[in-house]
Amino acid sequence: MFKIKNSLLHQTFAKLSQIKVLVVGDLILDEYLIGSVERISPEAPVPVVWVRNEKQTLGGSGNVVQNLSSLGVKGIVFGRIGYDKAGENLETILLSNSVAKQDLVLLKSKTLPTILKTRIIASHQQVCRVDREEIVPLTKEEEADILSQLKVKIKECSAVILSDYDKGYLTPSLIQSVISLCNSENKIVTVDPQVSHFFLYQNIHIMTPNHHEAGKALGKKLVSDSEIESACREISEKLTPDAMMITRGEKGMSIYERKSNSFYHIPTVAKEVFDVTGAGDTVITTYTAFVASGMSIKEAALVSNVSAGIVVGKLGAATVSQTEIEEGLRSLGYLEE
């Protein structure tokens, strides 16, 4: 069994607070209305949810920022919100997640609403979800303004995460411009992809699709290890990343290092799957932070797999702490004292 030295883990923990990770992507405000169901509506055959609690959290690329904060990593955030109450709330929550005011670069649209996803929860089960959004791509003028600000802020960061939810912020041209900028500045760039943009992410460090997304992009079903390996090679030939990671649900994750042509299949470590919301955000955030802090591709992938196993046991778009990661690695025998 591959293990991580305890001394390396703690050296990496110490470095996390010294780095900054720049997050570029689609900001979403997640709202939860939580209650119980005791009767069916007399108006229609639907449950009546008696709401007893409500909360708002960061979704989309905001959940990546939330995960960075939980790890003790400072974030620089580029995204879009509307001039509305949801936008005000989203900005407030971002600032409360260790993002400094000067590191929050928000495009505030006068015509588009802040993306708001409302989940109604009863007895730990999601009853329904209500989405409020308008998907409109950035204009060329907006892209140019974003890039000029990126050129300044990128010098402060150790890595860049593209968190693509296909909501209009990461346009094809902006994706390519950001990657080109990262490469010219020798910054690690990692991508949580969208199928619609799948083959635009060329010359990156790593991409982290799940097996459904990778399969859809290639037009085939990916189930076995050999099918996953073949998919990693095929995608890597087109995109030339340093590595490919395909997350596989109950089968864990598979990592391919292109230069050494080597594969690692890491089994799932989730004890109980309660809610998979945001697990992909945890994977890319943890991986990026730990690679930027000095871990190898294989070591950072193992940490991100353990982190994902922790968050799926929590409700909603959850995060993981350094303490939970260390405890998780130790309990699974992945830590070498």
Image (cartoon, rainbow, N blue to C red):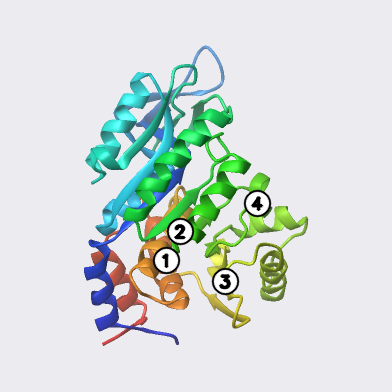
**Dot 2 corresponds to which residue?**
284
Question: What distance separates the C-alpha of mark 2 from that of mark 3?
Answer: 14 Å
Q: Residue furthest right?
A: 219
Three-letter amino acid code at the position of disc 2? Ile
Q: Based on the displayed image, in which of its 4 quarters is residue 19 positioned?
A: bottom left
Say whether residue 86 is left or right of residue 145. Answer: left
Which image quadrant: the C terminus?
Answer: bottom left
Q: Based on the displayed image, in which of its 4 quarters is residue 256 positioned?
A: bottom right
Residue 254 bears which disc, if any? 3
Q: Comparing marks 1 and 2, which lies closer to the viewer?
A: 2
Q: Comparing marks 4 and 1, which lies closer to the viewer?
A: 4
Three-letter amino acid code at the position of disc 4? Leu
**Dot 1 corresponds to which residue?**
304
Three-letter amino acid code at the position of disc 1? Ser
Are the residues tagged 4 and 2 within 8 Å (C-beta)? no
Three-letter amino acid code at the position of disc 3? Ser
Are the residues tagged 1 and 2 within 8 Å (C-beta)? yes
**Dot 4 corresponds to which residue?**
200
Are the residues tagged 4 and 1 within 8 Å (C-beta)? no
Residue 23 coordinates in the image, percent (x, y):
41, 48
Are the residues tagged 3 and 4 within 8 Å (C-beta)? no
Q: Is residue 3 above or below residue 29?
A: below
Q: Earlier in the sequence, mark 4 or mark 1?
A: 4
Q: Comparing marks 2 and 3, which lies closer to the viewer?
A: 2
Are the residues tagged 2 and 3 within 8 Å (C-beta)? no
**Numbered label tally:** 4
Q: Comparing marks 3 and 4, which lies closer to the viewer?
A: 4
Q: Based on the displayed image, in which of its 4 quarters is residue 50 positioned?
A: top left
Q: Earlier in the sequence, mark 4 or mark 2?
A: 4
Question: What distance separates the C-alpha of mark 1 from that of mark 3?
Answer: 12 Å
Which image quadrant: the N terminus?
Answer: bottom left
